[in-house]
Amino acid sequence: MAELTTLESLLEMGFDRNRAEKAVAKTGNQGIEQAMDWLMEHENDPDIDEPYVAPVGNVLGEEAQSQASTEEPTLGDTAEETAGEDGGYIETEDGGKRPMTDEEKREKVKRLEELMRVKQAERRERERAEEVEREKHRRKQGQELQQIRQKLQDDEMKKIAEQRRREKMEDKLARQRVKEKIARDREERAQKFGGGAPVSTAASSQPTPPSPSSPTGQGPPPTKKEYDESRIQVRLLDGSTITTVFKAQEPLAAVRVYVQMNGNTPEGQDFTLLSPYPRHVYTDLDMEKPLKELGLVPSAVLVVTKK
């Protein structure tokens, strides 16, 4: 009875001849398990189903040359190597070998098929584990990328918040400087125009006896009263009013700053001032003029209007 070689075993198991020949040649005819391993590892190769072409110098069926021990066996050598092939013979109790029966061949093919299923299951499990690891790596990279994006967004929000805080602080300091300047101007004007008032007031508090040489009905003509303060009422955009007192020599800009600081005008809203009776809209040049020069002493009503 003919032996069952590795190539024949693969064909019995249903492998294509081209694949079986390649597996036997590539594994050097080292046995069915090595050939099966090679087939499972290379089953997705694009040229797996192409006919096997032996390397140059090797012809199927020729005798091995002197250097054949270091070269890859050919399919001709595979077909001729029957003696000692585990697939075709079984050792007997007396140490000899006998050909395998058809039943034994079928049993061996059955075992090989079971071995192939086990190896395929192991390969699928290995591929599944590798896929799980790749998915874990992909998710980890996604989480790291999301963390980086979140950090960049947080840093940007911090920069915006810091910029707004700085702008508010600068605006607050600017308002404070304006207030301090107004206070200094008031003090300077009070000292300049009202410094002699207490002395004259004290002197005037004492009654002066009438001069005997001056006739009673012949005194100097009455002088026009001089006011050093002005009571300003300002009507805001929403109809409400605010009232305060300014020095007569203070510029109209002081009233504008007072409205900015104490009124309900929206921040950034530009506005101007006008007198309703007679109607007069004050310009930027008017802002530098004293209230007295503009005729706003001793009292006046101003209206806030949008520019």
Image (cartoon, rainbow, N blue to C red):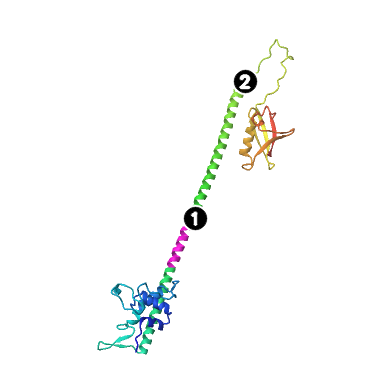
**Spot occupied by residue 42 in the image (x, y as percentages of width and height):** 41, 73
What's the residue at 44%, 68% (across, down)?
132
Q: What amino acid is labelled 1 in the image?
A: Arg
Looking at the figure, which quarter contains the N terminus? bottom left
Q: Which residues are magenta?
A: 132-145
Nearer-the-camera pick, 104 or 30: 30
Distance (Cα) linking label 2 and label 1 = 76 Å
The amino acid sitting under disc 2 is Ser
In the visual, does 183 lie left or right of 277? Answer: left
| Among the two numbered marks 2 and 1 on one chain, the one whose residue lies closer to the N terminus | 1
Label placed on residue 200: 2
Residue on which disc 1 sits: 149
Q: Nearer the viewer, mark 2 or mark 1?
A: 1
* Residue 233 pos. (x, y %): 68, 35
Characterize the magenta stretch by its predominant secondary structure. Answer: helix
Q: Which residue shows up at 42% across the image and 70% down it?
A: 129
In the image, is residue 25 part of the stretch drawn in magenta?
no
Q: Secondary structure at mark 2?
A: helix
Report the residue at 58% width, 25% height from top: 191
Name the residue: 54% across, 39% down. 170
User: Looking at this view, is 258 or 206 the one in front?
Assistant: 258
